[in-house]
Image: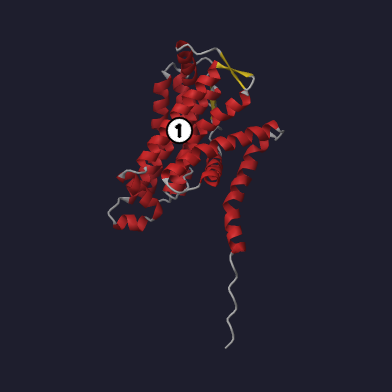
């Protein structure tokens, strides 16, 4: 049961990452590789601030702002210098690897002795009279795990509600129009460069927030944490779209949450069944490749062949 609660907690944390990937990949119709750097940057900034005694809320907010700046850097590289967002994201993410090393003064930061948001949630749980142990399906789960799970639910549901409402505003519709048809959006007077930059800023802020919370939940930050994390986000997004669909912002945002949790439960089940943890990223990459290629292959295979012309 502790494995289930842990998988749910990590799934909730990574749903913020998937929400950022959804904003760039589906709404803006661009693959942003700043994701890897932003996730690690959020973890590094939050970890260093917490290790130096900064309040967990303040540290998490500053880590989110760092993600905004990372997204803004990619946006500026794209709009000011005309570099494609894919290449711009690679450049910024590469630079952020060195930034993380400078921020953490090395490759690792331990949060074992630091005050974190999950620890704060546990103290609030105790102050409100919550039990020290909760029994779920016959298994005892500690108050710390339950409090952290409740905290992550609040973060995730709040972020997803705000995202769904934003996509229905005039500004959100302009961002969606930019992703659907940039030429048409430009003809209607939309500042396409600004909308792309805004989407990158919002997405990388969510991704850095996910990294900051993930580091606090794990109890450490490592410079390798963000490597390949964009593939995880894509895998979760694809699972959600397969389960929920893509019609409308509400369904898409709901699919982000459901897909991430289901994916993490599948990962937990695979590890429990004996999958080598070293092969996890390989299996994830293969899964994403199959999910991207298979629909097109099936479409070509099921497409009726053209009939030969009838002789006169």
Pick the quarter of the image with the N terminus.
top right
Q: Position of residue 120 (x, y in %)?
A: 46, 16
Q: Nearer the viewer, residue 258 or 74?
A: 258
| Vertical position of residue 26 compared to residue 62: above or below | below
| Vertical position of residue 212 compared to residue 72: above or below | above
Q: Residue at x 39, y 27 (%)?
A: 62
| Vertical position of residue 165 compared to residue 85: above or below | above
Q: Which residue extends farthest left?
A: 189
Q: Which residue extends farthest front?
A: 137
Query: Under tag 1, what secondary structure?
Result: helix
Q: Residue at x 50, y 47 (%)?
A: 245
Asked if residue 76 shows in the view, the reply is no
Q: Position of residue 305 (x, y in %)?
A: 60, 70
Q: Position of residue 262 (x, y in %)?
A: 58, 37
Q: Residue at x 40, y 51 (%)?
A: 179
Pick the quarter of the image with the C terminus.
bottom right
Q: Position of residue 43 (x, y in %)?
A: 49, 28
Q: Residue at x 52, y 46 (%)?
A: 241
Q: Mark 1: few, some, or many residues within 10 Å (few <14, many ≥20)?
A: many
Q: Nearer the viewer, residue 185 or 113?
A: 185
Q: Nearer the viewer, residue 303 or 137?
A: 137
Q: Which residue is mark 1?
A: 208
| Image color mode | secondary structure
């Amino acid at each position: 049961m502790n494995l289930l609660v842990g998988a749910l907690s990590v799934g909730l944390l990574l749903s913020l990452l998937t929400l950022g990937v959804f904003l760039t990949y589906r709404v803006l119709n661009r693959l942003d590789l700043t994701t890897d750097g932003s996730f690690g940057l959020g973890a590094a900034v939050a970890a260093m601030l917490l290790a130096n005694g900064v309040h967990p809320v303040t540290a998490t907010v500053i880590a989110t702002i760092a993600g905004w700046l990372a997204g803004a850097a990619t946006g500026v590289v794209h709009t000011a210098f005309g570099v494609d967002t894919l290449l711009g994201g690679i450049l910024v993410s590469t630079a952020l690897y060195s930034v993380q090393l400078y921020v953490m003064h090395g490759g690792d930061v331990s949060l074992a002795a630091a005050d974190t948001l999950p620890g704060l949630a546990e103290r609030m749980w105790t102050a409100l009279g919550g039990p020290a142990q909760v029994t779920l399906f016959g298994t005892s789960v500690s108050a710390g795990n339950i409090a952290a799970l409740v905290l992550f639910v609040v973060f995730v549901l709040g972020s997803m509600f705000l995202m769904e409402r934003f996509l229905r505003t005039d500004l959100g519709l302009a961002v969606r129009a930019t992703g659907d048809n940039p030429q048409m959006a430009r003809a209607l007077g939309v500042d396409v460069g600004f909308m792309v930059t805004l989407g990158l800023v919002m997405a990388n802020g969510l991704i850095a927030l996910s990294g900051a919370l993930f580091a606090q939940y794990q109890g450490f930050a490592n410079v390798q944490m963000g490597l390949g994390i964009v593939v995880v986000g894509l895998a979760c997004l694809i699972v959600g779209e397969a389960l929920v669909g893509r019609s409308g912002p509400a369904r898409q945002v709901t699919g982000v949450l459901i897909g991430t949790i289901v994916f993490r439960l599948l990962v937990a089940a695979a590890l429990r069944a004996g999958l080598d943890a070293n092969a996890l990223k390989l299996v994830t990459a293969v899964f994403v490749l199959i999910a991207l290629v298979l629909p097109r292959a099936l479409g070509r295979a099921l497409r009726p062949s053209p009939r030969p012309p009838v002789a006169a």
